[in-house]
Image (cartoon, helix red, strand yellow):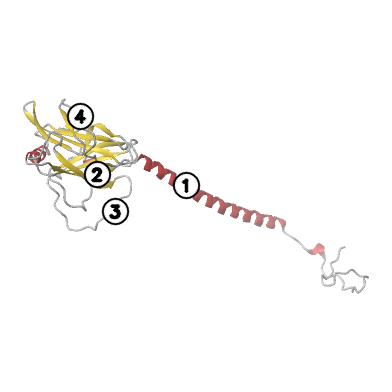
Amino acid sequence: MAWAYPPQTGKWPGAAGGQWLGPLVKLGAVSVDWVTVSSLATAGGTLVLAVATFGSIRSANRTARAAERALQIGLRPVLMQSRRDDPPQKIMYGDEQWFKLPGGSAIAQIREVNGGETVYLGLSLRNAGSGLAIIHGWILYPERPRSIDQQHPAVEDFRLNARDLYIPVNDTGFWQAAYRSAGDPDYAGALESIKNRRPMGLDLLYGDHEGGQRVITRFSVMPRSQDTLTPEDGDGLWIAIRHWNVDRPDPRVTPPAGPARPAPAGLRVRRVTSGRQPGHSD
């Protein structure tokens, strides 16, 4: 049988200065639950591993979000007015009518075609973003919207283009449309505005080449003076005045709701679901 001696002596019986104190602890009586000890050690190790894994997952998620955002920025288009020194573009409409569109200018003309008056519209555009832009639809306002805190129209209210219009990165392109039917509810307003040379507004819906990151940009179109108008000048000057994100949060603070304001003339819009409409992009 084994015996333990007091640690304060550190001497065995019979050694010089040693003193016999008798049995202090019987080692065989000490019982250790090694199963419990191993379970506690395993739990502690698992906890440390879980904390390390959680931290690494959070770091990986942040990295993934940053990479995704960088990819989206690399695909994001932003349409602006083209510069005056950009080269002119020659545009053909669906009825084989041709127009010359100078840089930084607009087309707003009326021509006699097949015994009726057809309204032709066009804008010279520049893509200031970092991704290819595809124009999906448009809404014309025969009178220029004046309130800067207006909310953008719903996506389903835009007229669909008959074909996709592409604007390359850091390059110029165009938007075009035409009203050919007097039965179109917006035909009369557009015809009157062009004849009276009134300022107009235009909303364009566009996005990246994957169909995402859609943006609505509002343009203000100012007619040129008849006294100084030349074929090289185009029919009007225009400028982008507002951008709204459709698929991403809007960076602006939404203005508080106030009393209802009357919509600007020509704000009546039509829901277009499919097909080529009387007023359409060529």
Q: Dot 4, how many residues are within 10 Å of its Cα: few (below 14), some (14-19), or many (20+)?
A: few
Name the image quarter holding the N terminus. Answer: bottom right
Q: In which quarter of the image is residue 163?
A: top left
Q: Say which residue label 1 marks.
A: 63
On the picture, is 275 further left or further right than 52? left
Q: Residues within 10 Å of mark 1 (few under 14, many from 20)?
A: few
Q: Identify the residue position indicated by label 3 in the image.
A: 252
Q: Residue 90 carries which label?
A: 4
Residue mark closest to the camera, 1 vs 4 = 4
Q: Taking 20 as reference, is 278 left or right? A: left
Q: Quadrant of the C terminus?
A: top left
Residue at position x 86%, y 66% from top?
3
Q: Residue 217 carries which label?
A: 2
| Dots 2, 1 in contact, CB < 8 A | no
Q: Which residue is drawn at 10% across and 43% down?
A: 198
Where residue 69 appears, as percent x and y from the top left, is 40, 45
Between disc 4 and disc 3, whose residue precedes? 4
148 relative to 72 in the view: left or right: left
Looking at the picture, how far across and down is residue 83, in whole percent? 23, 40
Sooner in the amino-acid sequence: mark 2 or mark 4:
4
